[in-house]
Amino acid sequence: MCGRYAATKDPAALIDEFAAVDLTEGRVRTDHNVAPTKVVPTVVQRHPRDADGAVLEDEPTVRSLRTMRWGLVPFWAKDPGVGSKMINTRAETAKEKPSFKKAVSSRRCLVPADGWYEWRRDGKEKQPFYMTGPDDGSLAFAGIWETWRPKDDKDADPLITFSVITTDSVGRLTDVHHRMPLLMPREKWDTWLDPDLPDVTDLLVPPPVDLVDTIELRPVSSLVNSVRNNGPELLDRVEPVAESALFDAPGS
């Protein structure tokens, strides 16, 4: 699963990296410990709308950076609290599950992240690890999103939420946890974000091992266990007593 990650880049860096326009309206904050229900930046690609809100399907799509709340709330949900149970969507069943299949076909997003956290169990102890890329570039989690409004107030501001797609871990990551966020390679961003492409079955598969092999598996402090802790020290490497060379950074 993916239940925590770090997202520290400012909108200027993200709009340049993802070739998007900025629609975040100043709501992006540096966050070293992103947890479910937080509002964070995402990348979407949509057709523009006219003054009445109608989709202009003949107009080119526009890629934008906008904020969403983590934890998918389907449009038919009675209560937005259901989102806390839908922070992840399994790639293997996303196309069949009623809560996810419509979003998978037409409402896909990318979730920029510096890296994500996972916990490896060793007996009664759990060692947190931070998985991050080899350079300053963002990792792009595949995600899906939804718009929700209370049924008794159609004029209420919409709640925009998302879920991170997860898949089986591959390569070295299997030694930390059996699941991982679905990392979308840069060359697949256009395809994943295309709102006019309903079938992305070929992309709902574990990432290639050569991509995963570039990821650093960094043991970090148990400070990350608490969502109240949120600072750059969470990313600092620590040395477990019996750490294997397996978890050294690539090339070290």
Image (tube, rainbow, N blue to C red):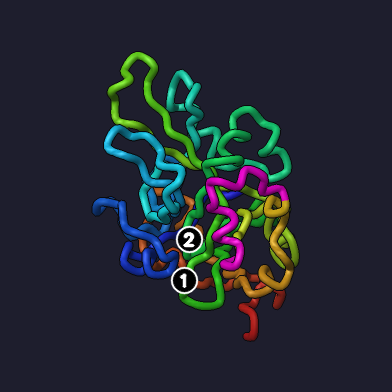
Where is residue 143 shown, x and y percent of the image?
Answer: 54, 48
Where is residue 22 shown, x and y percent of the image?
Answer: 31, 57
What residue sits 43% from the left and 27% below the top?
80
* Secondary-structure class at tag 2: strand
Q: Nearer the viewer, residue 73 or 128?
A: 73
Q: Nearer the viewer, residue 33 or 17?
A: 17
Is residue 57 found left or right of 9 in the rendered image? right
In which image quadrant can residue 156 be found?
A: top left
Quadrant into which the C terminus falls: bottom right
Pointer 1 local density, CA inside 10 Å: few below 14, some 14–19, many at least 20: few
Query: Which three-letter amino acid code belongs to the residue tagged 1?
Result: Asp
What residue sits 37% from the left and 21% below the top?
150
Which range of residues does the magenta coloring cover?
185-201
Cα–Cα gap, marks 1 and 2: 17 Å
Name the residue tied to disc 1.
236
What residue sits 66% from the left and 39% below the top?
94
Q: Residue farthest to the left?
A: 26
In this view of the protein, can residue 178 be seen by the observer? Answer: no
- Above or below, 222 relative to 144: below
Query: Which three-letter amino acid code belongs to the residue tagged 2?
Result: Ala
Name the residue tied to disc 2.
113
